[in-house]
Amino acid sequence: MSSVTPPQHRRYVELTPDKEQKISQLVQRMQQTYSPLPEQLQVLLRYAPRPADAPTPHNTIRHYCYCALISRNWDLQRAFAMLEENVAYRRQWRLDERSEMPTSISLRGWEQMEVVRALGKEPRLANQRADKIVALLGRHFPCGLHRWDKHGQPVFYVLFGRIEEEAIVRKLKQVANVGQAPEDVVWEMLQHLIGVGEWLAYYQQMQYDAGRLDVDATEGLIRATTIVVDMKGFGYSMIWKPAIDLAVSCLKKLFRYYAECVHQVLVVNAPSMVSFGYRIVRPAVPATVQAKVRIAGPDASLALLKEYIDEAFIPAHLGGQCSCEGGCCTDYNPNPQDVLTATEEHQYGGVSTDDITLRAGAAHRIVFALRQKETVVWDFISASGHDIAFATFFVPSSQCAGVDMEKADVRSLEAYVVSKTNPSEGSDEYKATEDGVLVLVWDNKQSWVTTKHLQMKVFKQQDLGKVF
């Protein structure tokens, strides 16, 4: 007899004959368009082979098309367009080829290498860019995957009330590559996180099929994730436009490329004013997902969680019985004012991407005093695509006496020019062959009207060690 309390909520909509017909039509169109089948569908068929006549919730191919249709309100044309866009997106990022585990994202309830072996995948290499983004943002954006709900679906927890928005935006600018916006950096992390969630769902289905997972998944395939948003600590001061814009951008991308990836969103410990914040982001959430959002105040939160998650798997800090060694969420800290140490700031935050505005007739100068063999690296791009005059000069120490290189007339440096170009973007480095001063100049003096906006990352490599 199962030890898990039966779930109270369905995962699949009632499939009328009309809806089943639309699924059949989309399956036919998909099979006519893709030969071989889309890579993700091939992966799903490998992990969950099913008879061709299995009912839709248990039929891997029909379920794949069901997700696209329900995500686009059963509009056949829009569902096929989403399917095409999803296939192209996954191919662009090689999502069905790359490895997602082991991951540095907080994960409890699975032995990561066992998941890798069961899926027949290669282990993911450590110290990738996504890992460094996770390490940088972790204390400001506590979240993690923790066990599963009553249907066997992975549960993702976000401690939203402990998020430090201004710190996140500042750190995102530091870790951004030139040409990247903060939302692009967040999406790098979320894309990896979603990939981990997909791997766990594949694994959960395999475990259930083998009789090793004590859940109720009789209704259909395990494909989605349940999200728990803990609002404890949330206040009006956290409704900050740059952070809201960031969240809306990521939500739009999530629901654009990932069909029916969310089973339920449980917002717990919600203060009365949380409905105001939800109204701001709600337009970015599809109607099908809005219907899955449930909000509970502090007194009703545990009861809501217990409807979907067995109490033994609910973290203790949310009133449940689970107390994982090292914490159910590795980034959880009851003191939300915690900050990065000086060592972590140096390791992860030392190289900043700066936004520079050059008005017509203005110039921007950066000066480095270099020892022999020291290297300066730069990477920049004109946000509007306009060319910019860029020059590098190196003045030997013997010629620097009494000269302030921060203020010296550029014309006086002509004898020491290293390079002069007029690019819209550039990436290079300079290694000193002797002691001296390197001067980098971005010049907008040829323009009488146009203001130019640059993103740039410039640093002395020896000071920072390995840079990502």
Image: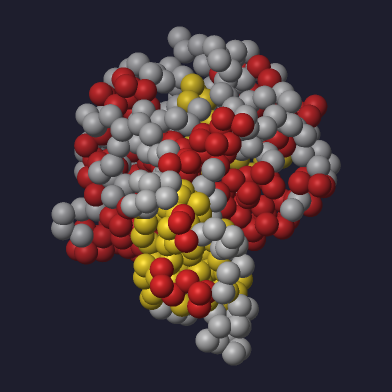
Give residue 18's position: percent from left, percent from top: 41, 59
Name the foreground residue: 25 vs 416.
416
Q: Residue at x 42, y 38 (%)?
A: 465
Q: Is residue 248 left or right of residue 420?
A: right
Compared to 65, does 264 lie above or below? Answer: above
Q: Is residue 94 left or right of residue 452?
A: left
Q: Is residue 303 left or right of residue 438?
A: right
Quadrant in which the N terminus appears = top left
Compared to 73, does 269 lie above or below? Answer: above
Give residue 339's position: percent from left, percent from top: 67, 32
Quadrant in which the C terminus appears = top left
Name the foreground residue: 374 vs 71.
374
- Please identify the quarter of the rendering in which residue 391 is found: bottom left
- Please identify the quarter of the rendering in which residue 403 is found: bottom right
Give residue 243's position: percent from left, percent from top: 67, 52
Q: Residue at x 61, y 38 (%)?
A: 141
- Please identify the quarter of the rendering in which residue 33 is found: bottom left
Give residue 44's position: percent from left, percent from top: 28, 40
Q: Residue furthest bottom?
A: 448
Q: Residue at x 41, y 78 (%)?
A: 422
Q: Is residue 38 left or right of residue 58?
A: left
Q: Residue furthest left?
A: 35
Can residue 13 be spotted in the picture? no
Name the foreground residue: 239 vs 306.
239
Name the foreground residue: 295 vs 389.
389
Compared to 80, does 125 lie above or below? Answer: above
Compared to 409, does 216 lie above or below? Answer: above
Q: Residue at x 59, y 46 (%)?
A: 171
